[in-house]
Image: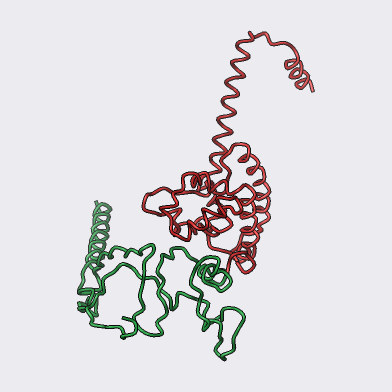
Amino acid sequence: MKNIMMALVAASALLFGAVQAENADTQADTNPGGIGGVGSLRGMSEIETTRPADDFKRFPKDHHLESSYVYQPPLVPHTIRNYEVSLNANKCLSCHSWKNAKEMGATKISVTHYVNRQEQVLSDVSPRRYFCLQCHVPQADAKPLVDNNFQSVDSLR
Amino acid sequence: MKLLKRFWKRLSTPSKAAAGVVLLMGFIGGLLFWGAFNTGMEATNTEEFCSGCHAPIVKEIRETIHYSNRSGVRAICSDCHVPHNWTDKIVRKVQASKELAFHFIGTIDTDEKFKERRGHLAHREWQRMKDNNSQECRNCHQFDYMDFSEQGPRAVSQHSTALAAGDKTCVDCHKGIAHKLPDMRDVAGWQ
């Protein structure tokens, strides 16, 4: 009899503990700093709720892109899915380098890319200009999040 | 010794069973052998089998169009790396036994070793594809059915000239389509 009682007590203690642990996990107010609730362009961001992700934006296969301001790095008007630009390989240069551009019918990269930061002219692309995608980016088919009234300068209009 | 002698006698003396029975046994045996052989060979063509040793390389395909795309058609390792034609397949499988040996020596069993050797491995595979006129590409991408009007202007200018004339083959331009690239410094047409 005594043994059964002990077993019962032990089991109920275990159960009670489990239920307690469950409660602690789900309750939002155990978060000492609150759960946020800051309003932003993406809506209210509460730490404990995860908003479903937006759909991926589509990149047009080939389109025409105008510059918006003087000295803007030209945009990439085609898809660049899986184009590797790394220490090993630079897919951009296989068409846009001076060596290949003519044969591929692509735009040559600017002469400024052959100058290092001591203003010396090099015989090949300067290492500081090697990672094309730092400045030249493709444009997704996406609407701006915020309205703006930017107008490009007369010469580019 | 006695056992061997008896076995030899059994092989050398004519069977007491009827010729039909012997033929049937041979036929069934052949079927079983062929089935088992082919199943075994197919098993070495699955993605799981390749991942057994090449897990990090197998993963690289995931972000490419040959793994995920709008229509859900996809290629697995063996579609590109093992010839589909039977005799060529056997030849490649026998060659692969050499690769097994390297696996046991541990030639590329760490990341560093693999990176070191990646260029060598890639160049070998490109050469193989060049030698067989990119047969594994052409198993799906058949030149005769390419619609140039659906291709971009740059693609048309290359496909309708060099590829059509046979001067170049798929892999000459399409390198690293399912994998990361090795050092491309000395590769023609790059950089």
The colour chain B appears in is red
Question: Looking at this view, is B125 or A1 the one in front?
Answer: B125
Picture coordinates of residue A147 (x, y %)? 22, 78
Chain letter of the green region:
A
Question: Looking at this view, is A112 or B51 the one in front?
Answer: A112
Q: How many marks?
A: 0
| Residue at position x 21%, y 69% in the image | A27
Q: Is residue A22 above or below residue B169?
A: below
Picture coordinates of residue B59 (x, y %)? 49, 57
Residue A68 visible here: yes
Q: Is residue A64 above or below residue B138?
A: below
Q: How is the image coloured?
A: by chain
Which residue is most to the bottom?
A: A118
| Residue at position x 49%, y 47% in the image | B141
Q: Is residue B16 above or below residue A125?
A: above
Q: Quadrant of residue B182?
A: bottom right
| Residue at position x 56%, y 80% in the image | A127
Question: Does residue B181 appear to the left or right of A34 in the view shown?
Answer: right
Residue A30 visible here: no
Quadrant of the snapshot with the N terminus of chain B:
top right
Question: Does residue A83 appear to the left or right of B132 in the view shown?
Answer: left
Question: Looking at this view, is A52 or B158 the one in front?
Answer: B158
Picture coordinates of residue B145 (x, y %)? 46, 44
Quadrant of the snapshot with the C terminus of chain B:
bottom right
Picture coordinates of residue A69 (x, y %)? 35, 83
| Residue at position x 56%, y 85% in the image | A115
